[in-house]
Image (cartoon, rainbow, N blue to C red):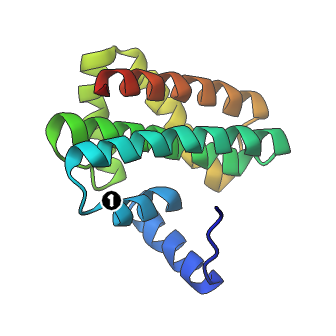
């Protein structure tokens, strides 16, 4: 069910999310899940990551590469946060924290995680700069989809 909020609030969410290096969806999800226990939070994050990947595919089909890119980044970030919540009982609070924690995920699941993360980060940049091609977004989406599936498996 779509949620409609006043444009003024949507803009505030965008600004606050950007300050924290988060996608707006991540920012909202953080607010909603703040009081959940870490395992429940991890489940919500990994489910939301999967949903963002589906939305990214839809945006890609429509040709909106910027929106698809941001959703790819959001899915990656949420998957990393899910891992942190489940394994370490913490949630990275910033883009910088995600950069650090992705090393722990790479240590557990393999160095390919680092490449997927870097591709996703380039998608976050593409949201602002609009430089990526449809092929770039498609490749990054595929790598992040693998990352989300791998983290989902280890959290079972």
Q: Residue furthest left?
A: 88
Q: On the rendered structure, is 12 left or right of 99?
A: right
Q: Badge 1, how many Cα within 10 Å: few under 14, some, many 20+?
A: some
Q: Is residue 57 left or right of residue 75?
A: right
Q: Locate residue 116, reporting x and y percent.
A: 48, 26
Residue 39: which quarter of the image? Answer: top left
**For residue 102, what is the image quadrant?**
top left
Question: 27 or 29, which is in the foreground?
Answer: 29
Q: Secondary structure at mark 1?
A: helix
Viewer-side residue, 49 vs 13? 49
Q: Which residue, as the protein is rendered here, is positioned at the far right?
A: 62
Q: Position of residue 52 (x, y in %)?
A: 57, 44
With respect to residue 100, does 156 lie above or below? above
- The number of callouts visible is 1
Q: Position of residue 111 (x, y in %)?
A: 36, 15
The residue under the point 44% across, 64% down is: 28
Q: In the rendered image of this protein, does residue 55 appear above or below residue 147?
A: below
Residue 23 visible in the shown view? no
Is residue 118 in sight in this rendering?
yes
Taking the spot 31% from the left edge, 25% from the top edge, the residue there is 156
Q: Is residue 3 above or below residue 72?
A: below
Q: Quadrant of residue 112?
A: top left
In the image, residue 135 lies at what x, y percent?
Answer: 75, 27
Q: What residue do we see at 68% from left, 34% from top?
A: 137
User: Which residue is at 51% across, 62% downward?
Assistant: 24
Work out which quarter of the rendered image holds the N terminus and state it: bottom right
Query: Disc 1 designates what residue?
Result: 33
């Amino acid at each position: 069910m779509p949620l409609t909020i006043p444009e003024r609030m949507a803009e505030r969410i965008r600004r606050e999310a950007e300050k924290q290096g988060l996608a707006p969806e991540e920012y909202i999800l953080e607010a909603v899940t703040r009081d959940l226990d870490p395992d429940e939070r991890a489940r919500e994050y990994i489910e939301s990551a999967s949903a963002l990947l589906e939305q990214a595919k839809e945006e890609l089909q429509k040709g909106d590469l910027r929106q698809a890119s941001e959703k790819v980044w959001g899915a990656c970030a949420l998957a990393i946060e899910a891992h942190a919540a489940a394994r370490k009982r913490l949630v990275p609070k910033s883009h910088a924290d995600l950069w650090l924690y992705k090393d722990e995920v790479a240590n557990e699941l393999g160095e390919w995680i680092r490449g997927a993360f870097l591709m996703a980060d380039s998608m976050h940049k593409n949201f602002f700069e609009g430089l990526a091609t449809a092929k770039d977004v498609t490749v990054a989406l595929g790598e992040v989809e693998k990352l989300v599936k791998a983290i989902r498996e280890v959290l079972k």
